[in-house]
């Protein structure tokens, strides 16, 4: 947990699209492995602009399952194509949404899909990935990516776009899975190798299968990672690093790269879990009794202002409080990972428990993840539209 902080002046933070859901129909389902499926949504002509995206971004899906509203975020796995959004969903043990999507979702079903969000995108090529001429003018660029399991999903969109953008671009991938049958997008990765034999390399590490080279057998630990960086990857000339997977692997890679002197601004990372179970920040019932000491929480959303009282004793997040007044407050994971609930604190002091989604410059300017943020002053104001 961080110490209580107050808003301060800082450089301009990145902007994002206004968060909104639309009902989209499933147009295609394709099994990637025994426990993962690629879901394609049809985007109608009048919404195409709303669903334009940068490779590496995600969408949140919202459905009613067994009478319960469930939201989950999934990375977009394909290059930008007008009229189409594709995500990959891997079934996880006990996962309500992922199990439903793999076992019950059908072509023609309509569910709510949020417009693309997220900052797991290339800083160097944030414009250039959609502008090949600009990328070509920048010359040789080299990316290294580490992914595990379904962490390959955003990497597929990034890799395809990056390699197609310039004949000089190169990308190396280390992809960890339990076994060969768990490798998502196996055919597509093979196609990339065939198409770009001198510019794309994929190194598969299998934790529960023996491979000829012991380096590619077992979990990626500190020793194995150091060897990969020293003897397998071209680690001395990397423009950007992309890390996507469980917390332990991503943190190991981040720490190791930091120890090797890699500038943090060159390392992009995304988690599909923090290892912690997020608390239920979906508008749980809070009763304010007369005489309670309260925080006054004011918020701005979609051009409208509102406020609500939160008992100090409830230790309630800003997201939870706001949802009790406005059920349309944007959120998805409620675990500090996706960034959907991002807002800017314009007045007051706060503490933020976890942050795996905001850039340092955003935090410096006062942006927070409201699912992880609690007031520390009698009054606090946040702006979801900022």
Image: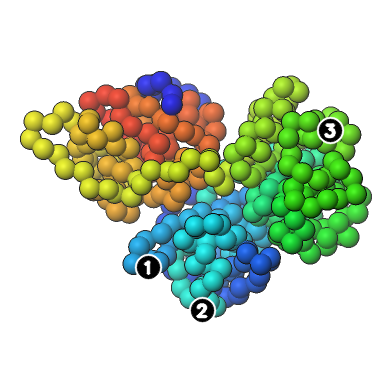
Q: Residue at x 41, y 20 (%)?
A: 3
Which residue has dot 3 on it?
A: 227
Discs 1, 2 touching: Cβ within 8 Å: no
* Residue 277 drawn above or below residue 116: above
Q: How far is disc 1 from disc 3 in space, using C-alphas?
A: 48 Å
Q: Residue, x 78% and y 47% (percent of image)?
A: 205
In the rendering, which numbered label is found on residue 66? 1
Q: Quadrant of residue 236?
A: top right
Q: Residues within 10 Å of mark 3 (few under 14, many from 20)?
A: few
Q: Residues within 10 Å of mark 1 (few under 14, many from 20)?
A: few
Nearest to the eye among marks 1 and 2: give it. Answer: 1
Comparing 163 with 241, the one in front is 241
- Residue located beneath label 2 in the image: 108
| Percent of width and height locating residue 2 | 43, 24
Question: Upstream in the sequence, badge 1 or badge 3?
Answer: 1
Query: How many badges with numbers are in the image?
Result: 3
Q: Position of residue 111 (x, y in %)?
A: 45, 68
Q: How is the image coloured?
A: rainbow
**Looking at the rendering, in which quadrant would you find the N terminus?**
top left
Q: Nearer the viewer, residue 163 or 386?
A: 163
Q: Position of residue 234 (x, y in %)?
A: 86, 36
Mark 1, secondary structure of its residue: loop
Left or right, 28 with respect to 336, comes to right
The answer to whether residue 187 is visible is: yes
Q: In the picture provided, is 114 more to the left or to the right than 140?
A: left
Q: Are marks 3 and 2 in contact (CB under 8 Å)?
A: no
Q: Is residue 132 visible?
A: no
The answer to whether residue 195 is above or below residue 264 is below
Element under disc 2:
loop
The location of residue 296, given as percent across then percent down, is 21, 33
**Distance from Cα at disc 1 to Cα at disc 2:** 19 Å
């Amino acid at each position: 947990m961080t110490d209580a902080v107050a808003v301060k002046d800082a450089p301009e933070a990145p902007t994002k699209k206004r968060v909104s859901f639309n009902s989209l129909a499933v147009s295609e389902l394709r099994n990637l492995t025994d426990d993962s499926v690629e879901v394609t949504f049809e985007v109608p002509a009048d919404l195409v602009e709303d669903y334009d995206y940068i490779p590496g971004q995600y969408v949140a899906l919202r459905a009613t399952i067994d009478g319960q509203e469930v939201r989950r975020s999934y990375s977009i796995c394909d290059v930008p194509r007008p009229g189409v959004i594709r995500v990959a969903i891997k079934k996880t043990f006990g996962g309500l949404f992922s199990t439903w999507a793999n076992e019950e979702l059908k072509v023609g079903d309509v569910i709510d899909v949020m417009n693309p969000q997220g900052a797991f995108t290339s800083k160097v090529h944030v414009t250039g990935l959609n502008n090949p001429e600009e990328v070509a003018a920048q010359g040789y660029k080299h990316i290294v990516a580490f992914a595990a399991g379904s962490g390959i999903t955003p990497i597929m969109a990034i890799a395809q776009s990056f390699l197609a953008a310039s004949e000089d671009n190169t990308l190396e991938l280390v992809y960890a899975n339990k076994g060969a049958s768990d490798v998502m997008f196996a055919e597509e990765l093979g196609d990339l190798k065939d198409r770009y034999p001198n510019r794309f390399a994929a190194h598969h590490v299998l934790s529960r299968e023996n491979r000829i080279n012991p380096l590619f057998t077992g979990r990626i630990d500190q020793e194995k990672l150091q060897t990969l960086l020293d003897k397998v990857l071209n680690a001395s000339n990397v423009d950007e690093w992309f890390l996507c997977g469980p917390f332990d692997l991503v943190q190991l890679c981040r720490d190791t790269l930091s120890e090797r002197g890699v500038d943090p601004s060159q390392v992009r990372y995304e988690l599909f879990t923090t290892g912690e179970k997020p608390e239920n920040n979906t508008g749980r019932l809070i009763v304010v009794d007369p005489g309670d000491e309260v925080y006054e929480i004011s918020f701005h959303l979609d051009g409208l202002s509102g406020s609500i009282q939160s008992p100090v004793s409830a230790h309630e997040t800003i997201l939870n409080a706001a949802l009790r007044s406005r059920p349309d407050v944007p959120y998805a994971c409620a675990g500090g990972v996706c960034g959907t609930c991002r807002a800017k604190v314009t007045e007051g002091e706060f503490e933020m428990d976890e942050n795996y989604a905001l850039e340092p410059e955003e935090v410096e300017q006062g942006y927070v993840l409201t699912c992880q943020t609690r007031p520390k002053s009698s009054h606090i104001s946040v702006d979801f539209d900022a």
